[in-house]
Amino acid sequence: MASGHVGPPSPLVLLMLSLVMAITAVGLAGYGFSTLARQGVRRSGIGNVLRSSAALAASIGIAMYAWGALHLVGDETMTVQACRDAVGREQSADIDRYEFSYIPLHLGCHVKGDGTYAAAIPEYVNPAMLGLAVLTATLTIFAAIEAKHRGRQNYMKGMST
């Protein structure tokens, strides 16, 4: 079980977080697309393609987080209803607490004697965010290695002239 606080999530915090995430995602997407568009994909060097791809992957991952967080925005009745839907009518009276965490996004509905059920957040959100985070990190590392390699080549060209 993810560690987090007990009780429903704060709608104000989730709205602010989603807004910041959406702005960041748009900014990263703008950077990624504009970098590729300046020279074209075929004429861009591998470093530009790697950096742009990393920005686009990060943009999609951040947008995915915002999408998941928006599923939690609502009042306490939304949380109660999401939990009732998750556990079923026969166990809804036995819900004794709600567990929430921001990373990974999780809303859990704890049923006495039966464990915790995930609610509200689509099942694909957290795995997609993890995959996109790994992809972003990998592309960023490759871009840094390529930049270091290109810098070394430029240095060696300067030494030979």
Image (cartoon, rainbow, N blue to C red):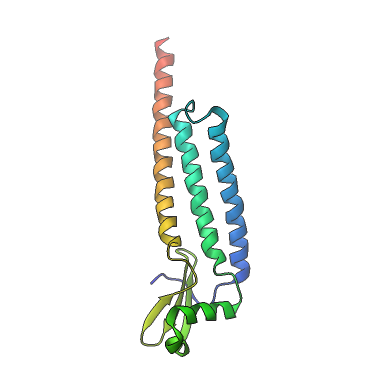
Choose top left, top right, bottom left or bottom right for residue 33: top right
Q: Is residue 58 above or below residue 43?
A: below
Q: Is residue 126 above or below residue 53?
A: below
User: In the orientation shown, which residue stands out farthest toward the left?
Assistant: 114
Q: Quadrant of the C terminus?
A: top left
Q: Residue at x 43, y 36 (%)?
A: 143
Pinpoint residue 30: horizontal percent, then vertical percent: 59, 42
- 114 horizontally vs 10: left or right: left
Query: Of residues 138 and 74, which is closer to you in this image?
Result: 74
Q: Quadrant of the N terminus?
A: bottom left
Query: Of residues 125 and 90, which is closer to you in this image?
Result: 90
Pinpoint residue 46: horizontal percent, then vertical percent: 43, 30
Q: Residue at x 53, y 80 (%)?
A: 81
Q: Residue at x 43, y 65 (%)?
A: 123
Choose top left, top right, bottom left or bottom right for residue 111: bottom left
User: In the orientation shown, which residue stands out farthest toward the top?
Assistant: 161
Q: Residue at x 60, y 66 (%)?
A: 13
Pinpoint residue 65: horizontal percent, then vertical percent: 51, 59
Query: Of residues 27 and 157, which is closer to you in this image?
Result: 27
Pinpoint residue 74: horizontal percent, then vertical percent: 60, 73
